[in-house]
Amino acid sequence: MGNLTEEQLNTTLTERPADWGGELRSPAFIVLHVITHAFHHKGQIVAMLRILGYPAPDTDLQLV
């Protein structure tokens, strides 16, 4: 993805990949969706830990 221009990232796809099951979206939308989905699951894990009485670890992104 590093070689796509901003315009390419934000342009809706015109061809459907063989195993694609949803609306055609832009690459930027797809990447953002995957990232927010991961955060959703991270939040579920933290909630489960707290309900079970365990301290939740620091879940912030570690930028090196």
Image (cartoon, rainbow, N blue to C red):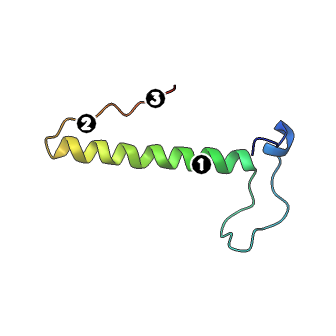
Image spot of residue 55 (x, y percent):
19, 35
Q: CA distance from mark 3 to mark 2?
A: 16 Å
* Residue visible at 50% across and 49% down in the picture: 37
For residue 56, the mark is 2
- C-alpha separation, residue under disc 1 versus residue under disc 3: 20 Å
Q: Which residue type carries mark 1? A: His
Read off the residue under disc 3.
62
Relative height, residue 26 to residue 60 (above, below): below
The disc, 1 or 3, on the residue closer to the chain's N-terminal end is 1
Q: Is residue 25 left or right of residue 51?
A: right
Counting residues from the start of the chain, the first of labels 1 and 2 encountered is 1
Against 50, residue 30 (above or below) is: below
- Residue name at image x 75 percent, y 46 percent: 1
Between 36 and 2, the one lying in front of the other is 2
Q: Where residue 57 sits: x, y (%)?
A: 28, 34
Q: Residue furthest front?
A: 64
Would you say 11 lies left or right of 23 here? right
Q: Position of residue 33 (x, y in %)?
A: 59, 48
Mark 3–mark 2 CB contact (< 8 Å): no
Q: Which mark is residue 57?
A: none
Q: At x 75% / y 60%, what residue is drawn?
A: 24
At 24% from the left edge and 48% from the top edge, which residue is drawn? Answer: 48
What residue is pinned by disc 1? 33
Q: Amino acid at mark 2?
A: Ala
